[in-house]
Amino acid sequence: MSELGAFLKSKRAAIAPESVGLPAVGNPRRVSGLRREEVAQLATMSVDHYTRLEQGRVTTASDSVLNGIATALRLTDAERAYLHILAQPPVRSRSADADGAGRPAVGPLLRDLLEAMKDVPVLVIDPRGDIVAWNDIAVALYFDFAEMPARERNMIRMLFLEPRVRGMHRNWDEVAAVSVARLRMSVGLMPGDRRMAEVVSELLDRDPDFRRWWGGHEVRATDSFRKSFDHPVAGRLLLDWQALTVAADPDLTMIVFTAPPGSATADSLRMLGSWAAG
């Protein structure tokens, strides 16, 4: 089954018939949630057209059809956007190199900025989540990324498969679930990217938690989140994570960790910064 079909099937299975005004009793139901014909009815489209979309016999659809399906399935804004991405794939991925071999270069001005941000941990990632640059305090927060093979230096891969990263998150389940949902959106934006496929394949093969969340077909476009860390030197840290696109190179994203001014975590970050500088 195509990703579009799997996504549609997952979303219709999650909707109780009575929640959309359909009877929950009557003819025996062989599937959970809505039937295909019920989705078609709610979306005001033919059953045959919807069935062919879900079965992968049709892989594209108009905006009006997709909007009708999104409304029928009560999709969130992120899920609605993802549905359009699947049915109307981008002409090319966000990164020109589909095999992932050519990572975006980090220019000297961006490196100067990382160096100047001494009290704020910053990572720079490419569209696949591979870490391509960092500052000293990010090393103090995590560890020296330069010691890792480049292909293991991936944010979501480390979250699931690197014990040091997985173990330092106090709210790991919450962070991991959101990260998987965010990854699914990224995969949709980069169709055919072999490096992205490699990361997903390895995680599916090696981690049962990832398999469970990936199978749920949740989608989010999260650009901020709060993480709770247990740090071996600084102790407990509550850090706000933000993803900021680099205007000079949209293929690069800065992941910035901050704490509210005057908080205990802000004091701990300053201590980490001094420790990193020393």
Image: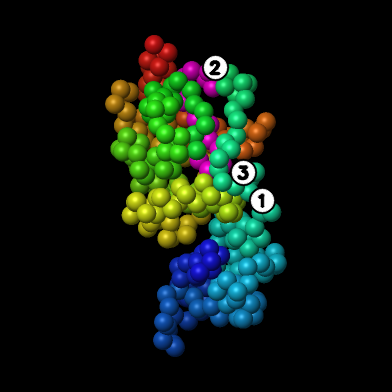
In magenta stretch: residue 215: no
Of the 4 image quadrants, the one containing the C terminus is top left
Using a 10 Å C-alpha cutoff, classify the residue at mark 3 as few (fewer than 14 neighbours), some (14 to 19) or many (20 or more). Answer: some
Separation of residues labelled 1 and 2 (CA atoms): 35 Å
Q: At numbered mark 2, what does the secondary structure look like: helix, strand or loop? A: helix
Please state which of the two labelled residues, at mark 1 or mark 3, is closer to the viewer: 3
Q: Which residues are magenta?
A: 113-129
Q: Position of residue 171 (x, y in %)?
A: 35, 42
The disc label shown at residue 92, or none: 1
- Residue annotated with mark 3: 97
Q: Position of residue 27 (x, y in %)?
A: 44, 88
Residue 62 appears in which quarter of the rendering?
A: bottom right
Q: At numbered mark 1, what does the secondary structure look like: helix, strand or loop? A: loop
Vertical placement of residue 116 versus 203, above or below = above
Q: Amino acid at mark 3?
A: Asp
Nearer to me, 83 or 108: 108
Please state which of the two labelled residues, at mark 1 or mark 2, is closer to the viewer: 1
Q: At numbered mark 3, what does the secondary structure look like: helix, strand or loop? A: loop
Q: Quick one: label 1 or label 2, which is nearer the N terminus?
A: 1
Separation of residues labelled 1 and 3 (CA atoms): 10 Å
- Residue annotated with mark 2: 116
Vertical placement of residue 190 versus 70, above or below = above
Q: Amino acid at mark 1?
A: Arg
Q: Quick one: label 1 or label 3, which is nearer the N terminus?
A: 1
